[in-house]
Image (spheres, coloured by chain):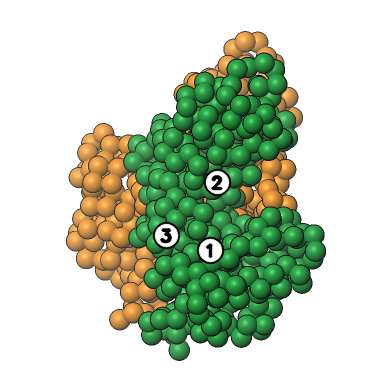
Chain colours: A orange, B green
Amino acid sequence: MKLTRPLIGVDLGGTNMQIGVVSPEGKLLGRSKKKTRAEDGSAKVIQRILDGISEACEDAKILPRSLAAVGIGAPGAIDPATGTVREAPNLRWRDVPLARIVSRKLNKPTVVDNDVRSAIWGEHRLGAAKGVSDCMGVWIGTGIGGGLIFHGRLYHGHTFTAGEIGHTTIFPNMPPGSRSLENNCSRTAIVDRLLRLIRTNHASMIPELADGDLSDVKARVVATAYAKGDKLTRTVVDNAAQTLGIGIASAVTLLGLQRVVIGGGLTEAMGEQLVAPIRESVRTHAAPEICKRVEVVATKLEADAGLIGAAMLAADKLSRATRTR
Amino acid sequence: MKLTRPLIGVDLGGTNMQIGVVSPEGKLLGRSKKKTRAEDGSAKVIQRILDGISEACEDAKILPRSLAAVGIGAPGAIDPATGTVREAPNLRWRDVPLARIVSRKLNKPTVVDNDVRSAIWGEHRLGAAKGVSDCMGVWIGTGIGGGLIFHGRLYHGHTFTAGEIGHTTIFPNMPPGSRSLENNCSRTAIVDRLLRLIRTNHASMIPELADGDLSDVKARVVATAYAKGDKLTRTVVDNAAQTLGIGIASAVTLLGLQRVVIGGGLTEAMGEQLVAPIRESVRTHAAPEICKRVEVVATKLEADAGLIGAAMLAADKLSRATRTR
């Protein structure tokens, strides 16, 4: 049975949640956005998800009862079979049966998976990894997340944490806190390094571009400085891209991947300026020879990858269930 | 249909080939061993495989025509769907349709896969990873090979080279030739480092244990020196085990693995003395917390893992084919 009714996709972050009404073909029909406010506890966060779903339905001019299903991408370790959030430090949740609660409230089938894994699934179904059966996504933001697709299926691993390339070790001889890929190559790590250099009197346009406020330098500021040729920014970003490329190359070598999709806030802001040096480094360091042909590309769905992917996970689970009936 | 007839398993190495007649339950019924002599070219090597199969059948007191199927593990990139050896530098082979040639000569279904992947499959079916659906094997010898099982299936990747953890980068800032896990942690790397230290007047029992011949120090000699408490050997081996554990921990983090099997010649010689420091390092470095529970165990099938695994790959392909008929 071909799905015709729209879906809900929720991208639940530690700070904000993005909610969309998505057609079965992946078109965004309406949306809403809310603060997460994890400090209020899971019941209130879940109520805000439900409110956000109503608002997105209004925006799309549909009735909630016409929805086919709900998909939610949440940060942390999720058991996709039950939709239980096992452990989500960003939300301060542990063993929250999110899918069960939402499906009872809305009387709709509900699927929950990790937020970055949802985004990769979106890219696999409709974006930069369409039709590629063995691929990895690497999402660069506050931290570095990732997701893996093998044999055309999302791979969760025994621990439901598979894909966490940010936590792999890149510099074994550095002290804890400076060893992992995330410690060295996240947007946070890049900005920290820039600020350290600026504070020790290295010239840069960053203070001017940030209007003198260095307490919260955004991806957009880094991107502008890079695009304008700011030397310090180029040095720091290119170095981080090279290091990240070495870590990604090891994953490509281990997994024989066809394609790697780079996403997350910094990628959305910088595009090919960030992806090109990563690609070069991956191809230099991947082995054997055949692995150097790996394709390294930027996200296509950008900031909507998570919610579109979550909606597609719900659609795909529904059509599998329909098929086997 | 339950398989009742015996199988052939071949472990084709760059130097030697090991051939076994294996029952459908994985019991070794007879065996033979031959030199590979890759320099004679593929036709002669394949003839020696066929001769070895006859000899193993004689040893098992069975007629070759009573065989159910043949499985071959070969070093290099293999397309398991066709059984073609795409690229095998150790054999100097490129695009050799090994499965097709052997199946025509013997008139038996023939399966070819990578040698280390075959060994891991043996451990998964009958050895140290029995019943574990997400696991990795790491084989320490001349180099470091590996293999991956996801969702209970061997994973080959887009390039047919997946599992090559030895080629991943562990020290990004070292010069080429000293960067990879294999460069630092293979038996060859360990022996090279020991010899470098011995030649610069570091005390060790190794020269005595090797009868003064340092041109070819075997795994057995390293194992004996370690067991006898030779300080230099302990320092070098423990350091390599720690480094290898960091690389394995990154794979465990990326893949959320339940179990890692350590095998190969050095593991067979040293057993828990090698596996214990690797395990400790893996558990120290794997993240998030749940990944530290990964089980790190020694090979159970030891030197026969490759041929038993190759025979099981043939058995499993046959019973799949039978099922779908």
Mark 3 Cα within 10 Å, few/some/many (few <14, many 20+)? many
Q: Chain of mark 1?
A: B
**Discs 1/3, front:** 1
Residue B195 lies left or right of residue B295; in this view the side is right
In primary-sequence order, the first of circles 3 and 2 is 3
Q: Nearer the viewer, residue A282 or A229?
A: A282
Q: Residue furthest right?
A: B40
Q: Residue furthest top?
A: A200
Looking at the picture, how far across and down is residue B116, in whole percent? 56, 56
Q: Nearer the viewer, residue B169 or B232?
A: B232
The amino acid marked with disc number 1 is: Leu
- Report the quarter where the N terminus of chain B lies: bottom left
The amino acid marked with disc number 3 is: His
Q: Kindly identify which residue carries mark 2.
A: B265
Residue A183 shows up from this direction: no
In primary-sequence order, the first of circles 2 and 1 is 2
Label 3 and label 2: CA atoms lie apart by: 19 Å
Residue at disc 1, secondary structure: helix
Residue drawn at x 31%, y 54% as measured from the top left? A79
Residue drawn at x 63%, y 70% as measured from the top left? B52
Residue A277 lies, with reference to residue A261, above or below; the image says: above
Q: Nearer the viewer, residue B23 or A5?
A: B23
Residue drawn at x 59%, y 30% as measured from the top left? B209
Residue A239 lies, with reference to residue A213, above or below; the image says: below
Q: Kindly identify which residue carries mark 3.
A: B124
Q: Chain of mark 2?
A: B
Residue A133 lies left or right of residue B101; in this view the side is left
The amino acid marked with disc number 2 is: Gly
Q: Nearer the viewer, residue B244 or A268?
A: B244
Residue at disc 3, secondary structure: helix
Residue B34 lies left or right of residue B39; in this view the side is left
